[in-house]
Amino acid sequence: MSRPFRPALLVAAVLALLGGLTSVTPSNAATTITVATAIGRQDNSTASVTGYVVGQPTATSTVVRSNFPNDYALALADSATQTSTSSMLYVQIPTAFRASYGLQSNPGLLGQQITVTGTLAAYFSHPGLKNATAFSGGGGSSDPGDPGDYYAGAEGKTGAALKAALHTIISNQTKLTYDQVWDALEVTDQDPNNSSNVIEIYSGRSIAKSSEGGGVDDWNREHVWAKSHGDFGTATGPGTDIHHLRPEDVSVNSARGNLDFDNGGTAVAQCSGCTADSDSFAPRAAARGDVARMIFYMAVRYEGDDGFPNLEVNNSVGNGTAPYIGKLSVLKAWAAADPPDAFEKNRNEVIYTQFQHNRNPFIDHPEWISSIWPN
Ligand SMILES: [Ca+2]
Ligand SMILES: [Ca+2]
């Protein structure tokens, strides 16, 4: 398959990066020191250090930039693109700050400028900062699910009013062409342990990015909200919305077809943990919540006001070409049993910062599912 160069995506990514670098102002710039200064001043004094989050230290000379193991530590540098650990300060994150500044919970902090106040002392046998008493920056919000007051318009709302407010918020987005989806999925669904691969959504298998296409055992662009349910095709719109477009093995994609989602059935070939019968499909357990949150996103994002059908979740299977997907009660149970993990949160963040500039609210706020769909 030919892969033409796509300058528009590159420009969008660069603009997103520049925006990220220039939008944060240190809260206490006059009295803070640089990372280089902090590295040279490991004397147990107290200081406020401003730098860019460049990863999580896991050993003296190892800093990871994805697949963050926990929320306990981060690495700061004077450049957002620094990769040399000798130019990094290792910051211990005390319990009180882990929910807001730990990278597993906040992968979007990567590349953000923050300021940390604490004791300049070795951590992981490396120049560090421990016993921090204050963190600031990184978007200026202590709520990782509400970057820059993204959800301000939904505040205090429930039920139909919440759904309407979220529809307005998430409809403000950049739209991709179906061709651009190939490149986007190589970023959003990259295997955290192998940057040459993507993870297939239903099966969980890691497959070479280069194996994209239509052949046996290639991967292609699966529409989790089956495109026949509303017949929206692959025109720019719901058919190219990467919040629900995922890499999947060609034959597994075909086995899912346009089936609704429900428990039960028999095993699906090449898809460990997946089952299907004549009117429904179930992915592996670890993908079930992801699937549910994608379906709920689509139901809120597409309300029939943009030339495409009003997509809705119902409690049926066998919906055929109607603009509905079921089964609501099962999808709610799947979402509860499989809450958002680091991979899913990172994916949402990457779509927001690099591609569509809108978010899946149900990854940020899973509690909104029951508010909008109480029964
Ligand atoms: Ca999951
Ligand atoms: Ca809808």
Image: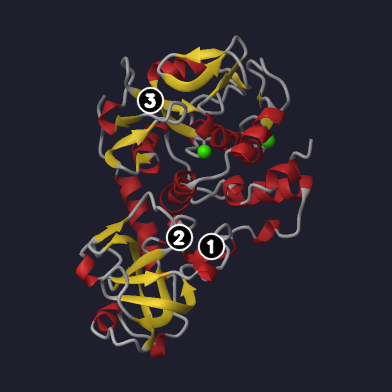
Pinpoint residue 24: horizontal percent, then vertical percent: 44, 72
Callout 1, which amino acid? Ala
Q: Residue at x 48, y 15 (%)?
A: 268
Numbered badge on residue 255? none
- The residue beneath circle 2 is 71
Circle 2 Cα neighbour tier, 10 Å, few/some/many (<14 / 14–19 / ≥20): many
Give me the disc on residue 220: 3
Q: Nearer the viewer, residue 214 or 59?
A: 59
Q: Which mark is residue 99?
A: 1
- Give the answer, above or below, for where 141 lies relative to 3: below
Q: SS of the residue at dot 1?
A: helix
Q: Earlier in the sequence, mark 1 or mark 3?
A: 1
Q: Residue at x 37, y 71 (%)?
A: 91
Q: Quadrant of the C terminus?
A: top right
- For the point 50% across and 21% down, the residue is 274
* Residue 124 rendering spot, x and y as whole percentages: 30, 68
Q: CA distance from mark 1 to mark 3?
A: 35 Å
Percent coordinates x, y for residue 306 in the rendering: 62, 38
Which numbered disc flags the more N-terminal residue, 2 or 3?
Answer: 2
Callout 3 crowding tier (Cα within 10 Å): few <14, some 14–19, many ≥20: many
Separation (CA) of disc 2 from disc 3: 34 Å
Which amino acid type is shown beneath numbered disc 2?
A: Asp
- Contact between labelled residues 3 and 2, with CB atoms less than 8 Å apart: no
In the image, 257: left or right of 86?
right
For label 2, the SS is loop
| Amino acid type assigned to the residue bearing label 3 in the image | Asn
Dots 2, 1 in contact, CB < 8 A: yes
Indicate which disc, 2 or 1, sits on the residue closer to the N terminus: 2
Vertical position of residue 233 compared to residue 47: above or below: above
Characterize the local packing of mark 1: few (<14), some (14-19) or many (20 or more) Cα atoms within 10 angstroms.
some
Residue shown at the point (32%, 75%) measured from the top left = 128
Question: Distance from label 2 to label 1 (Cα)?
Answer: 7 Å
